[in-house]
Image: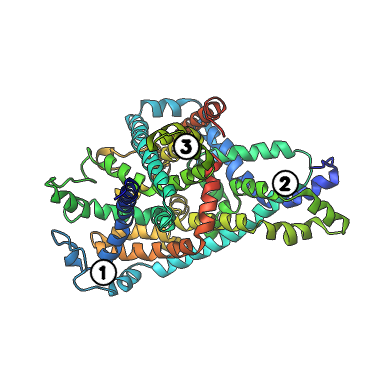
Amino acid sequence: MIKQKPSAKSTLIAFLYLSPMLIIIGTFYLYPIVMSFAMSFYTKYNFYTNKVSEVGLSNFVTIWTDPDFIEALKNTIIFVVGVVPLSVIIALVIAILLNKINFAAGFFKTVYFLPFVTSTVAISLIWQWIYNSQYGLLDAFLGIFGIKPIDWLNDPHWAMTALIIMTIWQGLGFNIILFLAGLSNIDKRYEQVAQIDGANTWQRFRYITIPLLSPMTFLVSVTSIISGFKVFDQIFVLFGGNPGPGKSTLTLVFYLYEKFYTEWKYGIAAAAGVVLFTLTLIITVIQVWYSKRHVHYV
Amino acid sequence: MTKKSISKILLYFILTLGGIIMIVPFLWMIVTALKTGSETAKIPPTLIPQNPQWGNFIKAWNAAPFLRYFLNSTFVMIVTTIGQIITTILGAFAFARLEFYGKKTIFILCMATMMVPSEMLIIPNFVTLSKLGMINTYAALIVPWLASFFAVFTLRQTFMTIPDELYYAAKIDGTSDWYFLWRIIVPLSKSTIVALATLEMIGSWNSFMWPMIATNSDKMRTLPVGLSAFTTDAGTQYQLLMAASTIIVIPMIVIYVFLQKYIIAGVTRSGLKG
């Protein structure tokens, strides 16, 4: 591209194009990023007068000594560990199978992807009904195999499992689409050559598909981890506005929501937000570091 | 039977089994929506409604101001999508084509917004909108979503694939930047624009946390927020809850079936942003 030097006039014109976007991004993304860090240090803040009369680190001390926050952090990690590996493996397997068929492939893609376009509120209500301990479909189905009814949503031992199952079901289509995109980028000739050399299906899968797909596998995992950190809507609806029985599905964003919206403790909520940001940042840094060193790019 | 056809059968068997697991919750929603209250409480559950209650949809629709929620959701979705596409086209053009001071700095600052979890920004945004007196108005539901840097970034990538020669040829012909953008670049980038618009439509229609926080009256609720509030009134009348869920799910499924190609292209891009 032939570079022209910017001038005062060209800058002015460019800002006319940019301004609608910049005003919104500035007001609702950039400014609040700075503000949420600032607010996490507000220890005495009057919302109505917008006066900050004290700043300090006490919000961070408060959350680290709050058993609820520790519980939320723990639950968020359990949730991510429960969802991500299973979701990635199932999506990978289904994408590879879908890639092998021609007949009805489009139909299957449509079906697997359906939950992605569906409102999480509606999905959570449907699952709330499926998980119902008296009239639910799931317990009725398990009953065929002689399994005693499980009170999925009211038993603290099962609530997290129920949430994880639903989340995997919901996110599968998104991950499958990404894997299919990754698979379509793999040159078919690699497999053909391996086949001529006598590699069987498993060997071709293990030594060709998996390594060549590793950038996508990594990307899908990172995306799933980050969205797992932010889980909220499902919990809110599935457990009727509560963080599950005995707070067993209290997560980081739910904690933030409770502090902010029901208790009006803005500083503490902002501090929880900073922790969420830090977790995301760690994953992003690992992603950048890892993809520079390990991922096999074709 | 050959080994190959056995593995084909196994393949379709697994995919069908998976497909059934994906579709059953949706079917169960519709089946339940057609049952009577007493039939929903049958043990074991009946798989086909004995006497389909089509009236449940009307009952659910009238049990809460769903018409209002529906219109709110539709209005917010249309305005947000159109607005976001306009700001995106203008911004992407500036980043792809124009030279200006501070370009790199602004670009990097905006990139940084993409990795910040939006849940964290809810608190300061709520404060900002309260100060502007915009809480519980359409503005609160629309204005923060009128720009998305992810969209700008994606469209910029598409704009940059359009050859420079086209631009210089247009310049020599005396075409203005403005005309060039709307008459040449935009039509050439149609598929990316439709993909972004579709993703925004789905996102807007289904968004829950922000509309819940930014509104406090029944009149301003969107469908997901209204549906969530309806659970308190409906209690255990799952036939009505499922009928209401069907009403909110159907429009997006229709959009999805028609624009599937664009949605999948858009999702692939959104995933690739990393």
**Residue B53: quarter of image:** bottom left
**Labels 3 and 1 share a subunit:** no
Disc 1: CA contacts within 10 A as few (<14), some (14-19) or many (>=20): many
Circles 2, 3 touching at the beta carbon (< 8 Å): no
| Badge 3 amino acid | Ile
Q: Which residue is mark 3?
A: A196
Please tell me which residue is depicted at 30% across the width and 44% down the height of the picture: A165
| Badge 1 amino acid | Leu
In the depicted structure, whether residue A173 falls above or below residue B180? above
| Element marked by disc 1 | loop
Circles 3, 1 touching at the beta carbon (< 8 Å): no
Q: Position of residue A223 (x, y in %)?
A: 47, 39
Q: Which residue is mark 2?
A: B96
Would residue B246 be found to the left or right of residue A60 on screen?
Answer: left
| Badge 2 amino acid | Ala
In the depicted structure, whether residue A92 falls above or below residue B31? above
Circles 1, 2 touching at the beta carbon (< 8 Å): no
Q: Position of residue A9 (x, y in %)?
A: 85, 47
**Labels 1 and 2 share a subunit:** yes
Q: Which residue is mark 1?
A: B34
Please tell me which residue is depicted at 72% across the width and 56% down the height of the picture: B185
In space, the residues marked 2 and 3 are separated at their CA atoms by 46 Å
**Label 2 chain ID:** B
Q: In the image, which disc is placed on residue A215? A: none
Would residue A25 be found to the left or right of residue B222 on screen?
Answer: right
